[in-house]
Amino acid sequence: MKLSKKILSLCLAALMLLSVSGAAFAAEDGKQDCPVVHVPGFYSSDIYADVNDTDTLITFPDTDSIIELVKTVVIPSLIVYCADRDIDKLSTNISSEIKVLFADWFYESTGEPQENSGVIFDETPESVNAESKLIFRFDWRKDPVAIADSLAAYIDNAISVSGCDKVALSAHSFGSNVIIAYLQKYGNDKISSILFDSPACYGVAVAGNLLTGKVTFDSEAIAYFLKTALGENEYESLLSSIIDIFDMAEIPELFTLFIDEVIEALAPGVYKEIFAPLFGYWPAMWAMVPDAQLDEAMSYIFDGVLEGQDTAALKEKIASYNAVVRDNREVVLKDFDSVGNFAVLSRFGAPSFPLSSAADLLGDTVIETKSSSLGALTAPVGDYFSDEELSGVAAEYISPDRTVNASTCLFPEKTWFIKGTGHFETELTEPYYDYFLFAEEELTCGKTDFGRFCTFDKETLALVKDTSEPQKIKEPSAFERLFNFLKALFERIGAFFKNIFSK
């Protein structure tokens, strides 16, 4: 896969906040004694334009389609804009094409799907026993409070068919919002234990910035994000050095300044035609707006972008979610923790998506660690806490690299921080779900071999203690950038000829 396609796919995934959760569960030390119902996140269930017709599956535009759109519409339109500065023409050209590409994803202004669009929902698993691993499928664009009603029916059926008294719940990302809504509406009686993996229930900065019109690009954040997104591969050193050369020449900064100018000019038209029906009409997106940005987002969208439109039903759904979940999260979770096993897995060590002013927040490329840990404090990306900033904090709550202060978490003894794993890498964490859900005694950070701060051993793919050290990002000099580029280039040339002569 070409680098450009890989990076674009990563960006689109983060923009959509699509949390893909798989079905590959495996027990560790925990012995499962009741069905597990997994509640995944965004883009985790198939959506159909007509739930009565399986031939109407809606798919996210593939990378080739998006690249073609950029090549044939976006770039030519931007070139014309540079010449005539006609923002209305630019907005019309881009908006019309994007509307066609994403038409089936749009919601109505009532916060409901178009016509009969949604998930083909099976309320009755045919065969369920105490060892079953079930995945709850739902329309992840929908109101979490309404989704909770469907989850309740699903849980009731699983209990009835299995003959068990309870089920265990696991959630990835947006699934945590749905589970809290379920607990608030239906209580704890049918749930034995809960695991949150990278939960989004405390908000996601990119969602808040999308709905407040604060879509900006930061050149340094983009360079750092791309380096992180490259991962480990044979071209990593070369590509990373190329990014450094571009950064030195201030090419990313010049580009982002131009893009920011275009976005600001396009915002009124594009938000009304594209962002509102694609994101703003999704109740689920509103559920992930951080508390601090909610009022501003409501004002920006409903008093500005959608002024004059009938959005009363959508606002009622938002208000319902706020009353059921947002205003009761801590009470609901603490109440459950008093009667059942509860654990949180948070990820750190990566920048947030560079599409907003939150790009310097430590996270997992999608959700900020502060949110996914339910309240930890984090240092800016590329920096670490000073002795003064950590004064009075017990050493056990400070990550080895001094970037996370876990003492402020809602559940400081039941929140594990995994360094260096991305938001979508659930295949690494899923094998540990049973370990937390079915431990013989309720686990706390001090009772696990890998401790509060951990990482994955790359050979065994097992959780181990994090032993990294504090390290600030050092800005390389021009000579170092050039040397690193030439070194990586010659290494790749040498590998190329070695490969040829070895055949």
Image: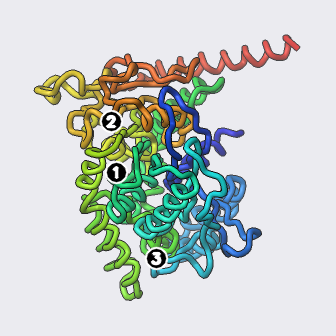
The residue where tag 1 is placed is 357
Secondary element at image label 3: loop
Mark 2 touching mark 1, by CB under 8 A? no
The answer to whether residue 315 is above or below residue 449 is below
The residue where tag 2 is placed is 415
**Position in image of residue 119 (x %, y %):** 61, 67
Tell me the amino acid under the disc marked 3: Gly
- Disc with the residue nearer the chain's start (1 vs 3): 3
Q: Is residue 401 left or right of residue 39?
A: left
Tell me the amino acid under the disc marked 1: Ser
Viewer-nearest residue: 255 or 229: 229
Which quarter of the image is occupied by the N terminus? Answer: top right
The residue where tag 3 is placed is 111
Which quarter of the image is occupied by the C terminus? Answer: top right
**Position in image of residue 213 (x %, y %):** 37, 65
> Which label is found at residue 339?
none
Neighbour tally class for label 2: few under 14, some 14-19, many 20 plus, Cα within 10 Å? many
Tell me the amino acid under the disc marked 2: Thr
| Residue at horizontal 40 percent and vertical 82 percent from the top | 313
Mark 1 touching mark 3, by CB under 8 A? no
Q: In this rendering, does residue 47 appear at all?
A: yes
Q: Is residue 87 left or right of residue 8?
A: left
| Residue at horizontal 31 percent and vertical 30 percent from the top | 444
Secondary element at image label 2: strand
Viewer-nearest residue: 244 or 85: 244
**Position in image of residue 196 (x %, y %):** 41, 44
Q: In this rendering, does residue 266 appear at all?
A: no
